[in-house]
Amino acid sequence: MDDLLQQGITAYKVGNREEARKIFISVVKQNPDNERGWQWMYNVCNTDKGRIYCLKQILRINPNNGKANELLNTW
């Protein structure tokens, strides 16, 4: 799982957002409780609705995630 996540991060960092998005979707489908997967998924979401969903998933996993709470409160 970490290898797949790292592949997505690498794709994102080289500017291949669509490939990164596909990989992060796979990561969170395989492990819905992967906080880092949802955090990266947030970065590649195409819609505000998708970003909000990612933030809610992050907070479901870790209610103490201050950054996710802060971002969610801006909506």
Image: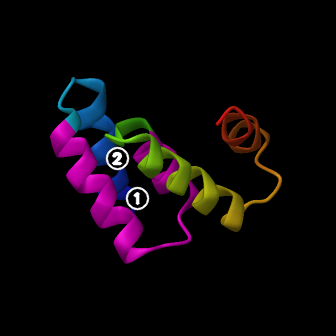
Q: In the figure, is residue 28 to the left or right of 56?
A: left
Quadrant of image for the C terminus: top right
Tell me the tag on residue 55: none
Q: Position of residue 44 (x, y in %)?
A: 34, 39
The span picked out in magenta is 18-42
Check disc 2: other Cα within 10 Å, few if <14, some if 14-19, many if 20+. Answer: some
Tell me the tag on residue 2: 1
Q: Based on the picture, tell me whether residue 36 belongs to the magenta stretch.
A: yes
Q: In the figure, is residue 55 to the left or right of 67?
A: left
How far is disc 2 from disc 1 in space, using C-alphas? Answer: 6 Å
Q: Residue at x 36, y 75 (%)?
A: 30
**Which amino acid, by three-letter code, is at mark 2?**
Gln
* Residue on which disc 2 sits: 6
Q: Residue at x 25, y 43 (%)?
A: 20
Q: How many marks?
A: 2
Check disc 1: other Cα within 10 Å, few if <14, some if 14-19, many if 20+. Answer: few
CB atoms of marks 2 and 1 within 8 Å: yes
Residue 31, image quadrant: bottom left
Give the dominant element type of the magenta stretch: helix, strand or loop: helix
Residue 1, image quadrant: bottom left
Q: Residue at x 59, y 62 (%)?
A: 57
